Image (cartoon, helix red, strand yellow):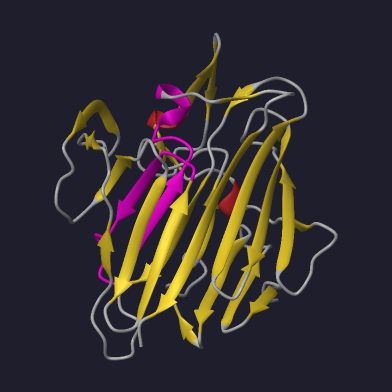
Amino acid sequence: MADQTHVLRAGGAALTIVPENGCRIGSFTVDGFELLRQGSHYGSFPMVPWCGRTRNGQFRNGDTVHRLPQDAGPHAIHGTGRNTAWHAAPGATDTTAGFYYDLAEPWPYPGRVTQLFELTESDLTITLGVETYGDSFPAQAGWHPWFLRNLGRGGQDAQPSFTPAWQEERGEDHLPTGRRIDPQPSPWDDCFGMPDGVDVTLTWPGELKLHITSPAEWVVVYDEQPEAVCVEPQSGPPNGLNTHPRLVTPIDPLEVSTTWAWESLG
């Protein structure tokens, strides 16, 4: 049976959410044109309770070492949320909807993850939250959208524009080495630091401009595949459970948001 979907609409924008497939955005259209790569592994999915790769599938919380599934070579990648069926929260409207799931194995700590979508005629805001039901634990949250490189209307490919403060040097294992370097030209599968908040613009010349912002201070940009350009705001860098742990405590949950604002250029 096909996954059930939840559709939000505002003005010329339509958002299709697939709760049973990792609560990902399966489709995002503006004025009838699709912006996301299609397919059950694509669209835009949440990365939670960690982002990107975690080295050797291990992280430490105090003196305790935990192991995660090594599903990216030797590493664990992109969290558990994208592979989990989420539940709809009450109170959905034509333009807003919330979803949640409870953390479980292989994540070693009990807690809850929430995701809220808020659509207007000019922008989409998504908010992820992580709370604990008991012990404190390190966590991350972010998004992995696969924006189409070309919108298929005969126009030019997307052109990303951003001004990061630094780039995390990437080692042969695809993880940051801990050294910060000057931003390098594309192609990228790299993490960048933006301490004043993520601020990236994707422009399809003559067609559409998409402004991607977030209070988060890290963004991974991935453009090594011909079909898509990924702009991934996240609360910490890859392997951040180990290198930049942000503790979720009973009085201090993790919350991060991103906004996609668009402008027609046609």
Is 162 drawn above or below residue 265 in the view shown? above
185 and 222: which is toward the camera: 185
Q: Is residue 8 left or right of residue 71?
A: right
Image coords of residue 207 (percent x, y): 34, 83
Residue at 66%, 52% (x, y): give it.
115
Check residue 80 for magenta coloring: no
Give residue 174's quadrant in the image.
top left
Outermost residue toward the right in this view? 90
Q: Going by the image, does 30 lie left or right of 166?
A: right
Say which residue appears at 71% left-offset and 55% top-offset: 86
* Residue at 68% across, 76% down: 7
Q: In front here: 185 or 105?
A: 185
Q: Looking at the image, how many numbered discs can be counted on the residues?
A: 0
Answer yes or no: is residue 161 visible.
Answer: yes
Within the magenta stretch, is there residue 218? yes
- Give the quadrant of the N terminus: bottom right
Q: Which residues are magenta?
A: 215-243
Give the x, y percent position of residue 62: 56, 11
Q: Quadrant of residue 133?
A: top right
User: Between residues 106 and 158, which one lies in front from this camera angle?
Assistant: 158
- Could one spot residue 228 in this view of the protein? no
Q: Nearer the viewer, residue 199 or 72?
A: 199
Residue 53 x/y as whole percent: 40, 39
Q: Can you give x and y, in whole percent of width and height, for residue 244 in the image?
A: 43, 24
Question: Which residue is outermost to the top?
Answer: 63
- Residue in view at x 36 percent, y 88 percent: 266
